[in-house]
Image (cartoon, rainbow, N blue to C red):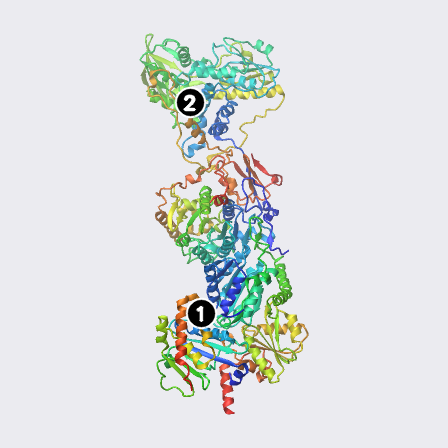
Amino acid sequence: MANLEIEPGSSTAYHTGDWSIEQPVYLDKWPPCSQVCPASEDIQAWLALASEKRWQAAWRKLTERNPFPATMGRICYHACESACNRNHLDSAVNIHAIERYLGDMAIAQGWQHESVDAQPQTQSVAIVGAGPAGLSCAFQLARHGYSVTIFDAQDAPGGTLHSAVPNYRLPSSVLAKEIDAILDLGITLHLNTRVNEDELHDQFDLVFLAIGTQQPRQYRGDSSNHSVMSGLDFLRCLNRGEPVSLPKQVAIIGGGNTAIDVARCVRRLGASAVVVCAQDPHGSHHRDLATEMPASLTEVIEAEAEGVQLIYRAGVRHLVRSGEHLSGVEIAHVEHVHDRKGNFNPRFFDGTEEFIAAGLVIFAIGQKADWQGLEGMSQANESEGVWVGGDAVSKSKLAATAVGSGYQAAMSMMANLSGEISVYQDHKKSKVAYRQMQLHYYPRQPRCEGESLEQRLDGFNEVVTGLADDDAVSEAKRCLSCGVCFECDNCWHFCPDAAVIKKEGGYTIDYDYCKGCGICAQECPCGHIDMVGRSSESKSPQTSL
Amino acid sequence: MTMENKKVTDLRDIRLHGRGGQGTVSAAALLALAAFEDGFESQAFPKFGSERRGAPVEAYVRISHTVIRAHNQLYRPDAVVIQDAGLLRSEPLLEGLTPGGLIVLNAAEKPEGIDDDFRWVCLPASQIGERHIGRPLPNTVLLGALAAATEWVSLTALEQAISNHLASKGEAVVKANIEAVREGYELSKPNPP
Amino acid sequence: MDNRDPFRYNVLTSGHRACSGCGEAMAARMVTDLVGPDAIYINATGCLQVFTSHNQQSAWQAPWIHSVFANAAAVASGVEAALRIKGKETPVVVQAGDGGTFDIGLQCLSGMIERGHDVLFVCYDNEAYMNTGVQRSGSTPHAVRTSTSPPGQFSQGKQELKKDVISIIAAHNMPYAATATIAYFPDLKAKVEKAMRIKGPRFLQILSPCPLGWAHDSALSVSVSRLAVETGLFPLVELEHGELTGVMRLAEQKPVEEYLRPQGRFKHLFANKAGGVELRHLQALADARIRRYDLLNVDTQWDTETAMQSERHGRGGYTVSSAVREVK
Amino acid sequence: MKQLLEGSLAVAEAVRLCLPQVVAAYPITPQTHIIERLAQHVANGELEAEFINAESEFGAASIVLGAVAAGARSFTATASQGLLLMTEVLYNIAGLRLPVVMICANRAVGAPINIFSDHQDSMSVRDAGWVQLYVETNQEAVDTLIQAYRIAEACGLPVMVCMDGFLLTHTFEPVDLPTQAMVDGFLPPFQFSRTLDPVRPMTLGGASEADNFQEYRAAQQAAMEDAMPVIEAFDAEFNEQFGREHGGLLQPCHLDGAETVLLGMGSLMGVVRDVVDKLRDQGQAVGALRLRCFRPFPAQALARYLASAKRIIVLEKAISIGAGGIVAAELRAALHQAGITTPVESVIGGLGGRDLTPDVIEALFQKSSENEAGATFRFAPDHKSLTRQNEEAMNNG
């Protein structure tokens, strides 16, 4: 055949795909923020929507997993930001600020949650505890058409969020509005109600126990209640608006967030605060001994800025009294607080004693569940129609953990009720570390912060304001979209073989022509493309749509 | 080439000598054109090679009653036109000139030591040319002289050839050259017997 | 014709037989899709011509002609002259490798530019004669191993320097001459579009890594070309009528070793002391280029960091300059 | 109407009449007057074309290659070293089957450098796939140039019109230039089916492999063979319209009853004709045959014309160094193929401008001891020594 002209594009008859040893595949991966988020929020997804100013869509995407964005945006200690791959480029995306921005916007705009299933279900579920776990579970069930009834012993819903989170961090009105939005899905709430096992068994198909930890752990070394109180009680009093009078100096015992909350409240009431905690400060911890201070670093820094004094690796040997009057505490270097079996058994080093003057000691050394009336259910399991979640059973006492726990319970219960296996299988996608990404494709851009109040010790006003509108967009755009295609076109531009086809909203790889050079995977900024060994089955075009 | 060949084709061969810049090749072309005007077949060509200003230049003309088919060089001229007498000292200008052949020389008078076998026409063609053309160009003056001395081409035909060939250079140039060719012709007309 | 991709023409489409990871194929695809199918392409002999027109199968979807190695610019001159006399405004684009530009094709290219033909000449510079098996060219950088500049007891690879062809081209009172590389698509796109808006001869030198000849992993073609820029060894510049009018600033200067390490063609430099001298020589060459073009301080629209930035939903594709020309 | 014109100018006029749209060339003696005149025509607006001053002959050939591929009738001219510098592109033009027309102002090839006429240049590229037509006079150059475009465009073959440098290009001769209307009546406007055009994109000049390359060459060979009747037919058609013909492939001179026939190409045949006339007048049975079309090589026609000759002399102005006469070798093969056993005397002369005078030609017609020695070829005698011998003979009586 001696043609003087060759047909355009006739090379497509030759399938260079046969040359390949490896082939690229598009793979949506689980970004580190979502991976560490206790509520398993799809952070990348709602940030992407926010970056396009699709605010309501972003809010809906967020609340699929967590119906408390305004609340969590304020109080969550945002592990997501510590894990953010952007820390390897400049600084983490200000996720919590955008979350709060979305939550506040939803409240301001009066956005309503929408049902997922139009069809109401016949089964009914009881939930004990109207804290974040119970409300999260109720929210999911109600969205899916189940009849939900919540019982709570308190006079207001919200659990610890309501009773023990200081107003300067979470104004009570914000929480109330988010709870109202949840209840608006048609959830029945019985307050001031202690329900018993039999009632639950008789009236409901399934039960979710989310009773939280409402009982403070007591200090064992001193039986006198005078000049000693628990952190939880202290915060409850404050949130109820009861008058609190303090001595000049207050010692707070404990290394958790409650201790820090208490200390900062003490400062706001005009007294000086010393926090004595058994753990190491952040940044010099011994991870194997699990001695890292559990309080959020941000909170600690804020507290120190507000004049709170912190003493690390110290424990209370005993309270020092002159008669009934408390004069202070004697502390000493503590090697460990709990022994190997987990029992409270502190070991102090002699010769390290120190006196801390204090007119009041507030112990914030943990809380426990109150099983009164539900003792029989405390050991029940799902086969008996009982789910247990929230702070009462989880090691982490974070509100977001409780929200996640409620979500998991709801999904599991619905699967149980419908007889279908849950389709929600989080944490099964592969992870994406910054080393799998090409960070040079992203512009460096400083993080936008909300503004802090200067005169913060004057009262219990919110310390941090929300983001400005423009800042929320540009901050959302800082998301690297780890492991999730954001259609940058790199794979499409860089394919030497025109084997990447661009479609509306994504790309397809034409394996007939892909030679498997690996450039697309190498140059994908967000690590969305993996090279895999070529198998005969994977010959059909693979898409990222 | 032998004389016999020449008789066969009734050729008249003319060789022109000059220096680069004197219009030697142009003169050959004009002569051939004039012959062609008169109804002859003719052919003109330079001594092949590159042209360098000031260097000796030769050009040739064939005039015939019959079609000229030869494209080879010309060795036995019947007339030689010499545009620069100085060349006589260095170049074999008269080589091959047939016995009784004509020499048309750009000089006020006949130089000494030239074979008496040849016929002569001498005239200060550069001066005449300068008078008419403004530059010491002897070529058309010498053509007029050649025409007058040989009657191989007519003056009318030469004038016509000049008009055609030099038309692109403008009317003034044509006119000046026609005057020059006329003067060369007039000066060289053989005295009436 | 192949219309698989709704978002670009695929002027150079699939099924071509370039090596896996070919930088030249990538560069040519970018350029030809930016120029579009309403143009006439002239190709010099070389890899691109061979792998796109293999044995009665063509990967081109635009009018395309190949004649011989040295004459692409002259063929383009003829095509352009023909179009001009016919009153057509079809753009004419030459594609050649570094051999067809720096060496054997330089004379025709120089003639084309001097005569002012309205032609875009694109050199896909892969710094050696790859088509014939990696022999040294005038574009091969100093100290590179090729099959005709092998390292040995008395040699550390190519002794001579890479020819500064962009300066040679620019010295023709050239309306537009620029360097680019595949790593910076937005920059490449801007330069192609700018070139297509200018009338007269235009020249683009696009650094196009060759995984075979440079001996790097085929996945690294883009990364390596980026490092060539970031180290200062391959400055991205624009010259108009001989004047420097555009430079890609280096956000930071990377040591040349980062560029050299992944490439087998520089491997011998890491083997002994003599190689070490050449490493310092290459660093000095990079430093000199940085000084010459003021790559670290010059005030520019983009730098090597900002020019890289990916954006959600891409940076625009291939909507194209032939339209721009029609408007003009 | 006949005019006395320099050969270069005459063919330049012929080129102008063919209305090429692109003219590209690089100056080389003795081709320069042709392109200078065309440049002037373009400058004056007498020819609507792009005149491209190429940077080399290689570039010039490439430019017309591109121009024809883009659908424009084009022209170039060169000679000697310039033609050889074009060689690669000449093959390419032919391989792409582009109907390019060019003039080769035949000149010797150095070293030593020599600007004068012989046929070594065009003979050296005889295998490149171009039709080669060698002309005898400037009139024929004009007419052949016009025919060349018709042939090239009808056959899809490039055509090289070979005219002797200086001997034709620099010689003023009477030439009858046709009018534009006459040329237009003979040469239709250029239509090229493989024009580069986005409206119908195609790939030209792609790579080929062992399993089809030979077919490309076979197709070129077939086109060449098919071109022979076309060349003859167009010359005949030209004759009808213009009243002049040039023999098509071959032009005989006094072949009737000729026992000794001299075969040659180009302008040297003028002197040969003069000599044949003279010898015929003297009663000698001599004749001549002019090979006008060297490529395609008209082997069968040659055998027909030479079937009855008793002695065949081939005089050619080129040499295949190490072998001898090129035309002679091909003629021997052609005659052998046709079963004709007449010996072919191969004579090489006129190299580098050496004059082939009537004396030389006459000497060739005479039998000499050298002829009978059975040499593969010999060089023609030098005209100066022959003249001296003749003069001495005359003087001696």
**Quadrant where the image shows the N terminus of chain A:** bottom right
| Residue count near mark 2 (Cα–Cα under 10 Å), binned few <14, some 14–19, many ≥20 | some
Q: Secondary structure at mark 1?
A: helix
Q: Could one spot residue B82 in this view of the protein?
A: no
The mark found on residue A294 in the picture is: 2
Question: How many labels were placed on the picture?
Answer: 2
Q: Position of residue D323 (x, y in %)?
A: 56, 73
Measured as percent of width and height from the top left, residue D238 is found at 61, 66
Same chain, labels 2 and 1 = no
Looking at the image, the residue that sits furthest to the right is: D339
What is the chain letter for disc 2? A
| Residue type marked 2 | Pro
Q: Nearest the camera: A47 or C141?
A: A47
Residue D229 lies in quadrant: bottom right
Estimate how packed mark 1 is, as few (under 14), some (14 to 19) or many (20 or more) residues with alpha carbons within 10 Å: many
From this viewpoint, is residue D340 visible? yes
Front residue of this view, candidates D31 and A377: D31
Residue B190 appears at what percent x and percent y?
42, 83
For marks 2 and 1, give the CA distance: 114 Å
Q: As displayed, is residue C183 above or below residue A137?
A: below
- Label 1 amino acid? Ser
Q: Are marks 2 and 1 in contact (CB under 8 Å)?
A: no
The quadrant of the rendering that contains the C terminus of chain A is: top right
Q: Which residue does the numbered mark 1 point to in the structure image?
A: B163
Does C189 sit left or right of B87 as displayed? Answer: right
Which of label 2 and label 1 is nearer to you?
1
